[in-house]
Amino acid sequence: MKPPSFDYLRASSLDEVWNALNRDDDVKVIAGGQSLVPLLSLRLASPSLLVDITQLKELMGISCDSNVLRIGALTRHTTVEKHPLIVAQAPLLAQAASWVAHPQIRNRGTLGGAVAHGDSAAEFPAALLALDATIIAWSRGGERRIPAPNFFEAYFTTALAHDELLAAVELPVGRAGATWGFEEFARRRGDYAIGGAAVYAERGGDGVCRAVRAGLLAAGPAPCLAPGLAESMVGRVVDAHLIDCAVAAALGQLTPGANVHGGSEYRRAVIGEMLRRALASAFELGEVA
Ligand SMILES: Cc1cc2nc3c(=O)[nH]c(=O)nc-3n(C[C@H](O)[C@H](O)[C@H](O)COP(=O)(O)OP(=O)(O)OC[C@H]3O[C@@H](n4cnc5c(N)ncnc54)[C@H](O)[C@@H]3O)c2cc1C
């Protein structure tokens, strides 16, 4: 199908973006276009003006200072997957990137676009929730720092206001005993997840869990954290039994909706198994398959 007609502006400054976004509610920014263009073609979106932000240097770059890794919104999925700083400091995010779609899409799609899109089946939101990320939003009025759990509000709905840009994400890094696991189930590699889990944890030398968070894929209308995980695991020596109990407690609080991929019970079982495997992998508890 063909998209409806729209005006197009390739912004060369942030001021141009603010002017356009404040014009009316019908204006949308476009980054990689890998979610927005299909929506236009299906006529699920019909903006009057598309503001192309891909030339804005302020939204680019990857840096690490004082145990905070900052990744610009325009960073392509492929770069997230391969950049040495991200691979070294946030391997969970790099691993999550490798599961997003196919190479052609990863070459064009941006981290900011994927996060702003707010799809509950997407890999980056789950990883950012697990990594305790802060989403940096800019508008003409200045900067807003939004903790990831407050950012994803509802079905394809985030805390970004219409006149805000997602500028970057920041992650705390370099914590002692940091470990991670990522598991996803999809019908084919590159498809959206039927279920999945991104786990970040901190483990003491004595095998005790010091911190744990898991972002879930396709577990509800919005990207979300596995409920109750820290209460089940922190302060305890982690073994397979503890993980089974923690997963069962989390699943008891989840009701994934039915969709073309299966009923709610099936999807809950898939998410539970992915969470179990990701936790076992993070805590190096041997064979997880
Ligand atoms: C066949 C196919 C398979 C895919 N499979 C997956 C998958 O398995 N997992 C997955 O996560 N994704 C998947 N995607 C989506 C892909 O990852 C997109 O690249 C990503 O969701 C959006 O990034 P983008 O830069 O292309 O954003 P765009 O498509 O340009 O924009 C998406 C939305 O975000 C807004 N936006 C973009 N950038 C900003 C910004 N900086 N600030 C504020 N708003 C912004 C736009 O207005 C729009 O509403 C798939 C896409 C296709 C076509």
Image (spheres, grey):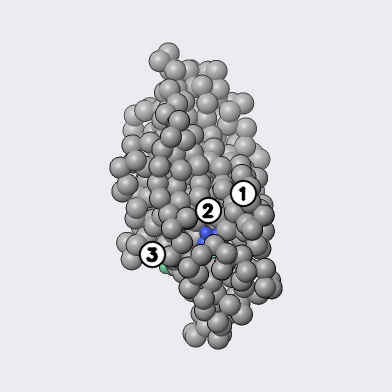
Along the polypeptide, which appears first: circle 3 or circle 2? 3
Along the polypeptide, which appears first: circle 1 or circle 3? 3
Q: Is mark 3 within 8 Å of ligand 1?
A: yes
Q: Which mark is residue 63?
A: none
In the picture, residue 155 is in which quadrant? Answer: bottom right
Along the polypeptide, which appears first: circle 1 or circle 2? 1
Label 1: few (<14), some (14–19) or many (≥20) C-alpha neighbours in 10 Å? some
Q: Is residue 24 left or right of residue 283?
A: right
In the picture, residue 21 is in which quadrant? Answer: bottom right
Residue closer to the observer: 77 or 217: 77
**Helix, strand or loop status at disc 2:** strand
Q: Which mark is residue 108?
A: 3
Residue closer to the observer: 253 or 3: 3
Q: Quadrant of the C terminus?
A: top left
Q: Is residue 284 left or right of residue 234?
A: left
Mark 1 belongs to which amino acid? Glu
Confirm whether residue 103 shows in the render.
yes
**Helix, strand or loop status at disc 1:** strand
Residue position for label 2: 167
Mark 2 belongs to which amino acid? Ala
Mark 3 belongs to which amino acid? Arg
The residue lying at 38 percent from left, 27 percent from top is 285
Residue 71 on image: x %, y %: 44, 47
The residue lying at 46 percent from left, 61 percent from top is 56
Instruction: Between label 3 and label 2, give the one nearer the viewer.
Output: 2
The residue lying at 56 percent from left, 83 percent from top is 6
